[in-house]
Image (cartoon, helix red, strand yellow):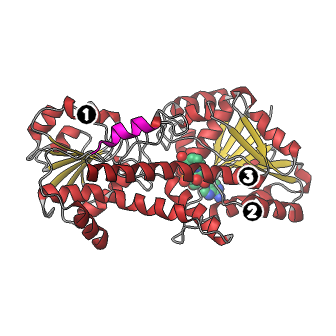
Amino acid sequence: MKKIGVIGTGYVGLVTGVCLSELGYVVTCVDADKDKINALNEGVSPIYEPGLSELIISNLNRGRLSFVNDIDLLAGSDLVFVAVGTPDKSSGEADLSQVDRAILGLMKVFDAESGPVKVVMKSTVPVGTGDRISRQFISEAPWIGYVSNPEFLREGSAVYDFMNPDRVVVGAHNPGDAKEVADLYERLEAPLIVTDVVNAELIKYASNAFLATKISFINEIANVCEEVGADVNIVSHGMGLDPRINPHFLKAGIGYGGSCFPKDVKALKQIAGSNGYHFELLSAVIEVNEMQKYRVVSKLHQYLGCLEGKKIAVLGLAFKPQTDDIRNSVAIELLEILLNKGANIVATDPLAINNVRKYLPDVTYTDDPYDAAAGAEAVIIATEDPIYADLKWGEILHRMANNLVIDGRNILFAEDLPSGIVLEQIGRRSKDRPAPVDYDSDFEELRRIA
Ligand SMILES: NC(=O)c1ccc[n+]([C@@H]2O[C@H](COP(=O)([O-])OP(=O)(O)OC[C@H]3O[C@@H](n4cnc5c(N)ncnc54)[C@H](O)[C@@H]3O)[C@@H](O)[C@H]2O)c1
């Protein structure tokens, strides 16, 4: 049975290591963060993912999974996955310092005597990175092979996605190296794409950029809907029935966030630019996304005027449901905007409060959405979490000081709400909106202030 190493125990590395051990491989995961490793060895996952804790504990007990702090302990591995972070720099370019450190560390661990090993890149790295690292291996450590194996899992369903992938993409210069990695996934019976490294790298960026483009497109349609009096939910439903379009990622809202889409879209734009091509469309995708959250701010102003001293409840902090990840969460960006306007914010989330508290101490936090709503002038739904659709909205209204609900994720149905609630959504003109509505000038003003 193959011995596998994984560098990085974040959302991708931990799920990869744990799922490969579940598939029967002997896996050693290494992370530079000692606290994470200590917790993992106690069977405690540092992140929330459905089903992950159970798999960590069962595979630790089977002796197929171990967590270490020292990269030297990966010696003897047949394959080493690299799943470290590739955050964006202020220029939009991907920061490869974690990747480069991991590669240098591996070149020290695997020398001419240790025998052949393959480095498998799971991190999302700019097109050309694999070729650069491969050249480094050929000249300094020719016993190390390089394979690109981008990851497509979604936080919130990462274990399921790893075990049931839409496709497995393997990019390599050497067909033998590609086969060794492809074979690891054989039991999953997923469509397999074996290609070269550049194609594999670009498949990942192109996929994320296309999904982000769909989101920004439907958000612009939503904004048009508000102007012309159409309903974006009906429009997107009608569009999505066309199989050439499909209904996925056609949900209007306050924009995409998370640790991947924002940085990957910017990185692809930057990769294209540094190779001599100006990717015009992505500039618009990014700008539309930046502005979309201001739709909520604009609606608040329209109903409440100045926000100074007004109590506002925000439901949802993570960038999506079923995760505690707040990286680039639009909800957090919204909190920052509202705090700057002097609003008193009470926020709630089922999983992410502890991660937000240290960044935004001026917000009041509660686990209970009903407590959050108490005395609030407005309630905002910022995360697309179905638990908020299932709240007793009569009780929420009863506790509020006013009656404005801004559903930034279009998860509520007006007909299910008690009368008395004024519901504003994205891309659906509210019958209660104060007239005349000078939406654009307010929006332009906000754009200028922002
Ligand atoms: N999060 C996602 O949903 C997702 C999905 C697909 C692809 N990706 C890509 O996968 C990569 C990892 O993303 P993530 O969300 O898991 O990141 P993360 O920040 O959650 O985890 C990275 C981990 O690597 C560790 N680390 C960094 N350098 C190290 C080193 N030299 N040695 C040992 N450990 C080291 C960090 O301590 C951290 O625990 C990124 O390139 C990301 O773009 C992420």
Q: What residue appears at the point 52 percent right and 33 percent down from the top-left corner?
A: 53
Q: Earlier in the sequence, mark 3 or mark 1?
A: 3
| Screen quadrant of the N terminus | top right
Amino acid at pointer 3 = Asn
Q: Which residues are magenta?
A: 230-239
What percent of the width, then of the height, locates residue 124? 63, 54
Q: Residues within 10 Å of mark 3 (few under 14, many from 20)?
A: some
Locate residue 159 relative to residue 333 in the image: left or right. right
Q: What residue appears at the point 25 percent right and 33 percent down from the top-left corner?
A: 413
Q: Which numbered dot is residue 199?
A: 3
What percent of the width, then of the height, locates residue 31? 61, 51
- Front disc: 2 or 1: 1
Amino acid at pointer 1 = Phe
Whole-angstrom CA distance, mark 3 to mark 1, is 43 Å
Amino acid at pointer 2 = Leu
Residue 14 in which image quadrant: top right
Q: What residue appears at the point 55 percent right and 38 percent down from the top-left corner?
A: 244
> Which of the pair 15/151 is nearer the observer?
151
**Circle 1: element type:** loop
Q: Residues within 10 Å of mark 1 (few under 14, many from 20)?
A: few
**Circle 2: element type:** helix
Q: Is residue 171 magenta?
A: no
| Label pair 3/1, CB-CB below 8 angstroms | no
Q: What residue did someone put label 1 on?
A: 413
- Front disc: 3 or 2: 3
Q: Is residue 237 magenta?
A: yes
Whole-angstrom CA distance, mark 2 to mark 1, is 54 Å
Q: Earlier in the sequence, mark 3 or mark 2?
A: 2
Q: Which numbered dot is residue 104?
A: 2
**Circle 3: element type:** helix
Locate residue 33 relative to residue 189 in the image: left or right. left
